[in-house]
Image (cartoon, helix red, strand yellow):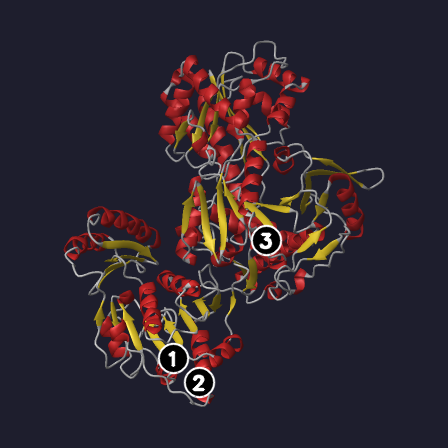
Amino acid sequence: MASRSCANLLDLVSVDLLDIPKTTRRIPRVVSVLDDYGSNDGDSDVLSSVCQERVIIVANQLPLLAQRNTVSGGWCFSLDEDSLRLQLKDGFSSDTEVIYVGCLKVDIDASDQEEVAQKLLEDYNCVPTFLPPELQKKFYHGFCKQQLWPLFHYMLPICPDHGDRFDRSLWQAYVSANKVFADKVMEVINPDNDYVWVHDYHLMVLPTFLRKRFHRIKLGFFLHSPFPSSEIYRTLPVRDEILKALLNSDLIGFHTFDYARHFLSCCSRMLGLDYESKRGYIGLEYYGRTVSIKILPVGVHMGRLESVLNLPSTSNKVREIQERFKGKKLIVGVDDMDIFKGISLKLLAMEQLLKQHPELQGKLVLVQITNPARSIGKDVQEAKREAYSTAERINQTYGNPGYDPVILIDYPVPLFEKIAFYVMAECCIVNAVRDGMNLVPYKYIVCRQGTQQMDIGEESPRMSTLIVSEFIGCSPSLSGAIRVNPWNIDAVADALNSAITMPDAEKQLRHEKHYRYVTSHDIAYWARSFEQDLKRACKDHYSRRCWGIGFGLGFRVVALSPNFRKLSIEHIVTPYNRTCRRAIFLDYDGTVMPQTSISKTPSSEVIAVLNNLCSDPKNTVFIVSGRGRSSLSEWFAPCEKLGIAAEHGYFIRWGKTSEWETCSLATDFDWKSIAEPVMRLYTETTDGSYIESKESALVWHHQDADPNFGSCQAKELLDHLESVLANEPVVVRRGQHIVEVKPQGVTKGLVAEKLLSAMVSSGKPPDFVMCIGDDRSDEDMFETISSTVSCPSLPVVPEIYACTVGQKPSKARYYLDDTVDVVKLLQGLAASSNQQPKRTILTQVSFESAA
């Protein structure tokens, strides 16, 4: 069932509380209008006089630190060296300009915003997005943190006490905030030269706003959080809107294959989209555009970590920790304070370990550093209370004067202090029940490696042990880590024991393996790889014609050949009227009959227009369908002069009084006894599938099966049938929700070729050919009639009109939007025929003799 959405984005940003002042443009741009393909395609892209490559990084927060001057009252800003958005700049070439768009971490008075914005742009290449306080609250603390964040971490609002129910006003605030971000990007973008890279779940509908303004924008998106399975994601009332918005990107990045797989599954189940891998790249075909999928975990900034490792303050802190925990084994954990980090589960595992191994009491310490919570709410407070009560119980039970087995640190810890704990810890544990990437293990590995300049009084350690949850993004890349299910307290306790008792040689081997990976896959490598894939995904932007279609968050861009255009009655009626020997080929399902129609019997309107076309002696009209001849004969019984090609042309009838002709290419159907049992096996194991038995073919349908399982079974069935029918004169092909076995050489293209040849042989070569179809099998007809242009037997080059239904990639040069448009076009041609005086009556071509 389709989710409810506003019909137009203007509806979403017209709420009184979202009275957002319009910003003024501060960067003058010298541009010229780009109009390669005419001005009617709705594309507003522009060409800049500036050719320098630029990357616009858009994220919720700017990589800046802000502090108010207590004397002057003004604001002082500095770059946040620990910000991932700032660090990824190292992956770009030195001559690439990077511009940042995002919010500040502090509230700026409206009277100071213009001055602050100008200063940040000039000094830091930052464009601040100022959201009104009420909008900021509903956008970030509301929709992002109360609804998207829990859902993406697999938490459903089953009852009001556990999660917040969907609130449409928060969704409106989310869309409105994304619109403000889009306005800021539009202030600075040169759409012909610039690449835009959007980060994380805060801005998932931003691609729609940008694509609507610039159809050929070069746009990448990277999700830093998990993407949930379709069973979780499908509960979101605005699920389709967010998916369609993300698909307005050219490249969508994920940390792990699991996250990408879940996203692709959602696109398949909810939007009916298929994906495939081509030469190692995963792509989704979406209205003529290929949306690429990138799978690559982010890395750490080696230079930043090593520079802090070399600080005197770090060395001093290391010595202090050495002295404080002398004679004890140190385990470290660094996590945000939220319900998904598994802090309490980690503490319970520590408690279990001390209970099972009394000899470790007094010798083992877990230091748990908790970063300040990023969200507010009762869940965070409950998690904090549970962690403190568990730690207190453990310390009372297993501690003694001067020794606490668990130390909780919940004040803001500077980076040098965290690094000092990493340096001294024999084991690092990340026990999140669900998390995005989580770079703590990477940082720990780098710190355990140390640097040559470090001054800690002894040789830097070169070994490490890691315990990581199966449910964090970095887990697949750390093959030497001990992976655990954080919910299994006993298993985590055993992992802790294994980590601290592991032989040094094994610790060294595991550490070296991890360090090689972390150093070769740092944040610069990640950014450079994403940039390269984004350029590859955008390389053919200006070789295609673009249309914007749809309203609101359903907006999308159709990208097709420059010669591809809509077929109008005004365009075709003149050549139709001046020609005398016309061949008209029409597919049935999806062309004159809607695919979604339950009853497949043609309407009286369709019967009437076909009879009108057939009554013109200049016309030869054929229905070319994959359906069986019995159904087609019954449905089109009122059409005396209509030609019918059934089962893709295996059976052909030139009129109601003619006999059915059978294709001579296939006479042996013994292969059915081989193929049908195989298909029956897959039908029995695939709920919702069924077999359609035709006289010349067998078809396995799976449109009513589970999308993922049906597709998987179809691939397997295709391989199975190709194997068992390798020596049979048949073709096994996969279509839209079908696997079909049919005789070799039988195609709709053969029908077109046979009819056109008959007209030429009878001395009546066609001077007008029109073919309309909607699916892959009709492409054979388009190809055949296009090849007639170069046929030497034709005295005059005919007017060719190959037309597909729907705006999509096709061998046809024309398109019509739907079956309604097709019927209207046919009605227009029929009316034109009726208005012409019938001065010349042509003799009916003897197709039987030509056949």
* Disc number for residue 726: none
| Residue identified by numbered label 3 | 542
Q: CA distance from mark 2 to mark 1?
A: 9 Å
Q: Quadrant location of residue 347?
A: top left
* Disc number for residue 833: 2
Tell me: residue 143, above or below residue 844. Answer: above
User: In this image, 20 relative to 788: left or right?
Assistant: right
Q: CA distance from mark 3 to mark 1?
A: 40 Å
Badge 1: how crowded within 10 Å, few (<14), some, or many (20+)?
A: many
**Mark 1 is on which residue type?**
Asn
Secondary structure beneath disc 3?
Answer: helix
Task: Tell me, yes or no, if residue 165 can be seen here.
Answer: no
User: In this image, 629 relative to 252: left or right?
Assistant: left
Task: Give the quarter of the figure containing the N terminus.
Answer: bottom left
Task: Tell me, yes or no, if residue 815 can be seen here.
Answer: yes
User: In this image, 801 relative to 171: left or right?
Assistant: left
Which is nearer the eye, 186 or 36? 36
User: Which circle, 3 or 2, is nearer the viewer?
Assistant: 2
Which is nearer the eye, 760 or 145? 760
Q: Position of residue 27 (x, y in %)?
A: 76, 50
Going from the N terminus, do you reach mark 3 or mark 2 first? 3
Q: Residue at x 56, y 39 (%)?
A: 532
| Residue identified by numbered label 1 | 619
Badge 3: how crowded within 10 Å, few (<14), some, or many (20+)?
A: some
Q: Position of residue 160 (x, y in %)?
A: 47, 54
